[in-house]
Amino acid sequence: MILGLIHNRIAWEEKEIIEAAKRKGVPVKLLDSRNMEVDVTGDKCDYGVDVFLQRSISYTKGLYSTLVLEAMGYRVINSYKCQEICGDKLKTTIALKQAGLPLPKTRLALSQDAAIKALDKLGYPSVIKPLIGSWGRLVALLNDPTSAKAIIETRETLGDNIHKVYYLQEYVNHNSRDLRLFVIGDEVVAAMYRYVIPGDWRSNATIGGKTEACKVTDEIEEIAIRAAKATFSEIAGVDLLEGNGILLLNEVNHNPGFQHLATVTKVDIAGKIIDYLKENM
Ligand SMILES: Nc1ncnc2c1ncn2[C@@H]1O[C@H](COP(=O)(O)OP(=O)(O)O)[C@@H](O)[C@H]1O
Ligand SMILES: [Mg+2]
């Protein structure tokens, strides 16, 4: 197998994947999505690879480089279909709901007034999220109608119409932590708790959330695998929130980082990714 690694920056994870491939005798060709320039109406471009692994951090670069490569007949993991769903919180929620998976109560509103009405139904505190985004950016806690109104009014001025699509969610009263499960194929290969950052209410490891390895119960495993399947994810970071002992799905990350997870669990995630690609290219 020759692996094509699509990226737009070689970070810790990409270095690990390149190292693991070397150890396992898999040649790697790097494709920087920033340098891609494709004749869409012309002949198929021969990249000389058997399968591509999509690791672009930029959502749009990842999405569109996958689209053109798939159009040429290449297999890309994760697929365009997966990225389109997982890159958008509303599309993810709909896919998970259709699969019958447990979710925090979530409402969509398309104007300021409708958003305030939706929040009255959800109650306070609740959470507002941008449809597209990660690392907790622009995800805000709405404590009461006054702060909700202020945040919604600010978003109306942000220019981009996508910010006027209001994805609103009940606040899940969890134990100051969420769960990150790393799925590869039909297996949860590693799992950790991520604790809420002091002085914040979010637990993203990238903004400083403390992490701890977590035991994977059958229940956790089943939810994570079903969530990955529902979103067509072959490799995924599935996030769960536990409120009053009930597990709820927060999101499915289609291009998950794994530096914190690999460090805290000591699982060779990059090696497992290469094994999966070899078996499923
Ligand atoms: N409904 C919720 N209730 C409680 N905490 C939440 C809720 N949604 C998100 N969070 C917290 O905020 C963090 C960021 O939200 P998330 O939906 O994962 O957005 P992002 O894609 O930016 O990571 C989560 O890791 C979690 O700690
Ligand atoms: Mg998240």
Image (spheres, helix red, strand yellow):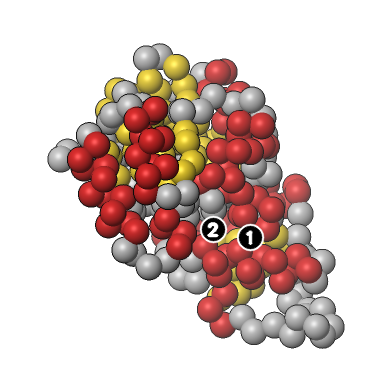
State whether residue 30 is above or below residue 38.
above
Give coordinates of residue 127: x percent, y percent.
Answer: 34, 38
**Helix, strand or loop at disc 2?**
helix
Residue 53 marker: 1
Q: Front-most of 89 and 164? A: 164
Q: Is disc 1's CB within 8 Å of ligand 1? A: no
Q: Front-most of 278 and 258? A: 258
Q: Residue shown at 50%/71% (left/top)? A: 8
Q: Quadrant of the N terminus?
A: bottom right
Does 97 sit left or right of 239 as displayed? right
Amino acid under disc 2: Ile
Q: Residue shown at 75%/47% (left/top)? A: 279
Q: Quadrant of residue 125?
A: top left
Q: Earlier in the sequence, mark 1 or mark 2?
A: 2
Give coordinates of residue 178: x percent, y percent.
Answer: 37, 31
Q: Quadrant of the C terminus?
A: bottom right
State whether residue 79 is above or below residue 175.
below
Give coordinates of residue 52: x percent, y percent.
Answer: 68, 63
Give coordinates of residue 173: x percent, y percent.
Answer: 31, 23
Does 245 sit left or right of 56 as displayed? left
The residue identified by callout 2 is 17
| Residue 56 can be seen, yes or no | no
Closer to the eye: label 1 or 2 = 1
Q: Are the two marked residues, 1 and 2, in contact with CB atoms closer than 8 angstroms?
A: yes
| Residue 145 can be seen, yes or no | yes
Amino acid under disc 1: Leu
Q: Quadrant of residue 117?
A: top left
Q: Is disc 2's CB within 8 Å of ligand 2? A: no
Q: Front-most of 258 and 203? A: 203
